[in-house]
Image: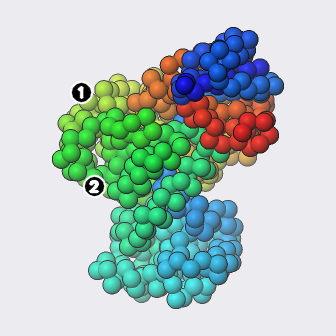
Amino acid sequence: MARVVSLINCKVYVKFKPVKTVSAVTAVDGKVHYVGDSEKASRIAKLLGGRVLDLDGSTVMPGFIDAHMHLDGLGVSLNSLDLRGAKSIAEVKERLRDFAARTTTEWIRGRGWDQELFAEGRWISRWDIDEVVPDRPVLLVRVCGHVGVLNSKALELVKEAGLRAEPPYFEVDEKGRPTGVVREAGLDEVLKLIKYSEQDMLKFIEDAVSYVLRHGVTTVGLTGCGPEALSALQLLDSMGRLKARVRAYLNQGMLPCLKTLGIRCGFGDSALKVLGIKVFADGSLGARTALLSEPYTDDPATKGLAVHSEEELTRVIEEASEAGLQVATHAIGDGAIDLVLKAYSSVWRYVKALRHRVEHASVIRTEQIKKLAELGAAVAIQPHFVITDWWVIERVGSERASWVYPFKSIIDSGIVVGISTDAPVEPVNPWETVYAAVTRGAFEGLKLYEHSPNEVLDVADVLHYYTYGSAQLLHSEDEVGTLEPGRYADLIVISEDPLGVSPKELKDIKVLATLVGGELTYSSGEIGIE
């Protein structure tokens, strides 16, 4: 018998560009069958022996599609020490002391600190951590995920593994001693030393999926998926326990394996698909490892770091393109985007067809936007960076302010755009992201808003790019992104009409229920959907 459910007496946003609303939606066997008036939707459900849910005026919309996040990293973060918002190194120590007292794992992991918030005005060091935890290895990762700090015990394990704790990836003091700070490729090597069991990884993924569903995210673009995470995802999928849709971009190192197996963009099923690979061109603005074309204003000694040479980056992208794989390239600084443009130009025949992506494009010049549009490349933006990177004008200077997070300029160029959070770098909650895109730090008094108020987006546009736009990035616009008949019934019930509240109120909207394929995957218990 068909699985049928009709949601009636509600305001259903079928799509946001153009805005289309109806009063009811009916799902049959996981897909939208009908959108229209409540009387007809109710009649369809009753004729087919399904359920009728009266939402009493609530608002319904397509589930959010987070085009770029780290589902496995989010799961680890949910099971690690949360250091977000710590205002001092002393506060980090206190949180670490409490966490260490109630955890028994060999390694202690934490994430979320930001030295820009520390009252001490400096970076945390190995010696700070040693004061609290001297006998177990500790890794505390900065909020951006590109820098971490190790204690002395962890540095001992690094040495035993044959890694050299020295520049450029390990910081040393004036005496040549490692400070514990590790960046980029060095951090990647340290992370390989931390092993998790299959059961651990299954728990991390399921915890993360439950968390995103609670926030109304029904499809995830998992960028940077390793073999352990992919194995866990496949196992959960085979057991019917993968409740959100996942579109995966595997780590660059897995490219040879993908080629050998002949896996191309779109391999998988409705729950889990492999689309391509994730490649890094540079680092982060917070760590000053994002590659700029000119030096940092607040540190003229550096322009940042290129992860690959131009030749190597081009070779990898050519190899992936010829294998029929979509490429998602992390490029934050305009210097890195220059490298990506050269590499994408060498494979221009593939760029539009495979929808090769640029991740972040945080500092991007006007002519670079134009070139990306000409190539047919796509861009994944993270509007909440505007709020978190409140210091960004100090990093790049006011003369480059118009290049920083120019969301509207990117969209107006005709580039395919998807919205995301980069979680756990930024909060999963989509309404915080919507708020950031619409207000651009105006209410927080951010300098970036003062320099670029013309880059704010309207609510309908943000919701369009956070649903259908993100679906396009993930080659999934025929499956998800709107509630038009034939697409999966991935939808959320929310507490307010997002087009009917003030900008300040956007971040206070609550998700009351989440349905994926017409099946309830989360309920707050507030509207009688169980």
Give residue 334's position: percent from left, percent from top. 41, 44
Disc 1 marks which amino acid? Answer: Arg
Disc 2 marks which amino acid? Answer: Gly
Q: Residue at x 40, y 30 (%)?
A: 475
Answer yes or no: do the residues labelled 2 and 1 have beta carbons within 8 Å?
Answer: no
- Tag shown at residue 94: none
| The quarter of the displayed image where residue 500 is located | top right
Q: Which residue is mark 1?
A: 349
Is 449 left, or right, of 344 in this rendering?
Answer: right
Q: Which residue is mark 2?
A: 253
* Of callouts 2 and 1, the N-terminal one: 2
Q: Helix, strand, or loop for circle 2?
A: helix
Q: CA distance from mark 2 to mark 1?
A: 24 Å
Q: Residue at x 51, y 23 (%)?
A: 487
| The quarter of the displayed image where residue 530 is located | top right
Pair 2/1: label in front: 2
Q: Nearer the viewer, residue 204 or 44?
A: 44
Q: Helix, strand, or loop for circle 1?
A: helix
| The quarter of the displayed image where residue 527 is located | top right
Give residue 1's position: percent from left, percent from top. 54, 25
